[in-house]
Structures are given as C-alpha cells and as structure tokens.
C-alpha cells in the first residue's frame, strides 16, 4: 500500500498536532500553572515579610509604651498594701491609720478587720474604725487619709453626737478599704 503525498501531509500534520497537544497538555500547561503558583506564593511571602518588617520598625515605639506601662505598674504597686497575706496587708493599713490618728491626737477606740472582697485582680481589705473626737480633727484625719501614699477609700462613714447637750465630741465610725494584689496575679508582669 502506497501513501500519497497528500495523505503523508495529512498524517504529518496530524502527528504534529498530536505532538503539539501532548506538549501543550503535559509540558506547557503544568509549567505555567506551577509558575503561577510560585508567583502567588512569592507575593504572599512578600506580604508576610512586609508585615514583619512593619512590626520590627515599630519595636522602639512598643518598647517605649512597655516602659511606660511598667512605670505605671510600679506606681500602682506602691499605692497598694504590701504583705504576703491579706492579714499582713490589713496590719499595714492599721499602722497607717494609727500613724495618722497619732498625728491628730486621736485615739482609735476600735479597729475591726472585715472580710475581704475580690475586685478583679485585687482584694479589697476593709477595716472598720471607731473613734471619739471633734469635727475639726475628724476633717484633718479624713484629709490625711485622702493624701496618703496608699490607695485608701472610705465607702462608709457615720458621724453621731456623743452627748446631745454638749455636741462638741462626736463618734466617728468609718470603713477604710485598702487594696492588695491577689496571690498569683503579682507574678504577671507587663
């Protein structure tokens, strides 16, 4: 069987078409797809790199903010009651109250430690204090409590007259609350 020139051309063109389809399907298309995947991965990695470079450029600013936060934390710690237990913190607060009362020549008639209350990361330690004095010394006592280096608040204050006929002396009953860092929280640092 003899193949004519025309048939040879058709067979050659057909063979070339099959080879071309094979090359396109199994060589060119996978190559372009892998090239596109590499480009996408490179773009994603460049974006991640830019993000980390931006973070690294902000390092000084973040360190300044961290130093400021540490300073604020230290100031706050100085205002809190110290002691390894709430009882020791209450004793420290009692010493502060005694010091202020001696300054104004007041006698603490009674000091009663009440149950502490949780306030977030802190324990509020209340002391109920009772004293007999006049209004002027009471005012000075309260002003010194407010100016004190420790953060002390007075949630309850009751003033009553000792003698209705001679109202110079008053009975002052107040609850003074100081704050103490709960165990375990103090180890967390900024």
Image (cartoon, rainbow, N blue to C red):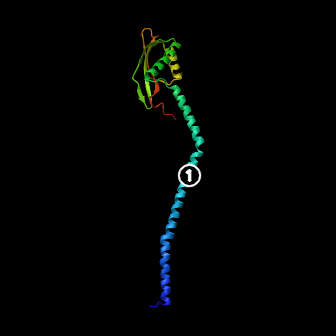
- In the image, residue 63 above or below residue 85: below
Q: Residue at x 43, y 27 (%)?
A: 123
Q: How many callouts does the rendering have?
A: 1
Residue 39 in the image: state x and y as whole percent: 54, 61
Q: Looking at this view, is 39 or 88 the one in front?
A: 39
Residue 44 in the image: state x and y as whole percent: 53, 56
Outermost residue, top direction? 165
Residue 27 in the image: state x and y as whole percent: 50, 70
Q: Quadrant of residue 43?
A: bottom right
- In the image, residue 76 above or below residue 15: above
Task: Characterize the local packing of mark 1: few (<14), some (14-19) or many (20 or more) Cα atoms within 10 angstroms.
Answer: few
Question: In this rendering, does residue 71 appear at all?
Answer: yes
39 to the left or right of 159: right
Q: Residue at x 41, y 27 (%)?
A: 117
Question: In this rendering, does residue 172 appear at all?
Answer: no
The quarter of the picture where the N terminus appears is bottom left
Quickly name the residue at label 1. Answer: 49
16 to the left or right of 60: left
Outermost residue, front direction? 1
Q: Residue at x 53, y 19 (%)?
A: 144
Q: Residue at x 60, y 41 (%)?
A: 60
Q: Looking at this view, is 174 or 166 the one in front?
A: 174
Outermost residue, left direction? 115
The local secondary structure at tag 1 comes to: helix
């Amino acid at each position: 069987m003899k193949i004519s020139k025309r048939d040879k051309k058709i067979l050659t063109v057909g063979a070339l078409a099959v080879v071309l389809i094979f090359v396109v399907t199994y060589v060119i298309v996978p190559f372009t797809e892998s090239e596109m995947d590499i480009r996408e991965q490179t773009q994603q990695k460049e974006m991640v790199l830019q993000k980390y470079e931006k973070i690294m450029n902000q390092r000084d600013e973040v360190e300044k903010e961290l130093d400021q936060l540490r300073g604020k934390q230290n100031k706050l710690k100085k205002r809190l009651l110290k002691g390894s237990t709430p009882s020791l913190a209450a004793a420290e607060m009692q010493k502060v109250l005694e010091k202020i009362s001696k300054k104004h020549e007041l006698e603490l008639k009674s000091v009663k430690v009440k149950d502490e209350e949780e306030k977030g990361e802190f324990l509020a330690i209340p002391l109920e204090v009772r004293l007999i004095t006049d209004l002027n010394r009471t005012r000075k006592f309260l002003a010194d409590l407010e100016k004190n280096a420790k953060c002390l608040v007075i949630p309850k204050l009751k003033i009553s007259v000792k003698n209705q006929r001679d109202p110079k002396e008053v009975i002052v009953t107040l609850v003074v609350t100081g704050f103490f860092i709960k165990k375990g929280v103090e180890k967390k640092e900024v």
